[in-house]
Amino acid sequence: MMNVLAGIWALLIGIVFIMLGNGMHFTLIGLRGGIEGFSAAELSIVASGYFLGFLSGARLTPEMIRRVGHVRVFAALGSFMSAGLIAFALFTDPISWTLLRIVIGFCMSGIYVTAESWLNASATNETRGKVLSAYMMAQTLGIIGAQGLLTLGDAATAGLFIGASILVSISFGPILLSVTPTPAAEVTRPMPLRELFRGTPLGTVGMFLLGTIYATQSGLGAVYGTQIGLTADQIALFIAMLFAGALFLQYPIGWLSDRMDRRTLIFGCAVLGAVFSLGGWVFGGDLWILMAMAFLTGGVTTPLYALILAYTNDALSAEDMPAASGGLVLTFGVGAILGPLGAGWGMQVSGPATFWLALSVVFVAIALYSAYRMTRRPTPAAEDTDSYLGVLPTASPVAVEAAGVWSAEQGELDREGDD
């Protein structure tokens, strides 16, 4: 593992700093928005703007890289993102914030595409799984660490936005000074949604619904905390719990994924997600139970993303997976755009508890649809399935495609070893 990290350490350090800045800004939107008197509906539009930009960046960045190269695209997007983070403190109105979120979402998506292209090029078939796992771990730790940094300042001032901008600016130093290869950023054209649905109905519907859950958690979690009267430190802890759960539950869920029908596991995780969300709704008045429910709800959300990808790998041929990866990212992105809009409107009309109710309803929808799909196709033998890899919902099509290739290759190696 140390040999693997030796070649990518600079990129991983840069990613941690980027995620520190990006994670700070996600929570700051809810904190500062509450201070400025923005409504839940207005903040839901702001939250959705990020995912609109993210989806656009995933489609356009490869062409930008082909025209001017990795280094220029990376530096340009980083500069725009750093400037955008500072601008949040200068233009405090919902329209400006929505436009800035679109820009930052676009930049982050482009940064992911560029970084993941470098990572993929630096990995071999033998090391790709470890490289992607280290990359996903760096992202998660950065997001969690960002919540701790929020306790060092006051959201009512520009200081925390400036701090987030500085972290993003610093992140490009180790990356641009240490990474020398310039791989091609080739992202396969996404599979049409009709064809994707025909090949994997559960993968398509599940990804869309999960996009609404993830975007609601990450985009409106701080808004919910503000509305129920949590302090800034408590809100930061709440957001940290939503992401920390994945660190602890990713491995056991992944272990089960390689040993049982993945549709059953998707069903079980979705049911647990619904139960935990209802627990947050019922016991939201108790701070520590609220934190526990956030930990558990977030803990099943991220593994569900990787589970659905693994199930899609099983359902489609290896030749179709590159195009399917782009289609799944697109489907997830559409859900992520729509999710906060629906939940935010509900919070505006019915109060902050709608945050948990919206999550539980969508978890139930995933559970019901996965149960239905189990009646439509036979269960594949565990030894005939591809390997599970803990991919995060923030991954670009580059990482999703690389993870799909690795899973298929690893599954084939495991089957050959059993023969």
Image: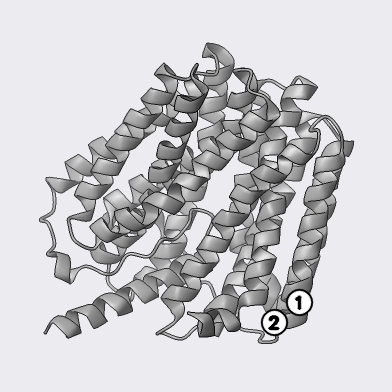
What residue is shown at x 18% (from left), y 84% (from top)? Answer: 417
Residue placed most toward the observer, 3 or 136: 3
- Which residue extends farthest right? 90
**Neighbour class for label 1 at 10 Å: few (<14), some, many (≥20)?**
some
Q: Which residue in the rendered view is the most extreme toward the top?
A: 350
Is residue 261 placed above or below 75 in the rendered structure? above
Q: Which label is found at residue 179?
A: 2
Say which mark, if any, is on residue 176.
1
Q: Are marks 2 and 1 in contact (CB under 8 Å)?
A: yes
Q: Residue furthest front?
A: 288
Residue drawn 38% across the image and 65% down it: 389
**Is residue 153 rendered to the left or right of residue 142?**
right
Q: Can residue 89 be seen in this view?
A: yes
Question: How far from the left and from the top, in percent, is residue 214?
Answer: 49, 42
Which image quarter holds the C terminus?
bottom left
Q: Tell me where residue 59 appears, x and y as whole percent.
A: 59, 62
Residue 359 place in picture, x, y as percent: 42, 31
Q: Is residue 308 above or below residue 301?
A: below
Given residues 61 and 141, the one toward you in this image is: 141
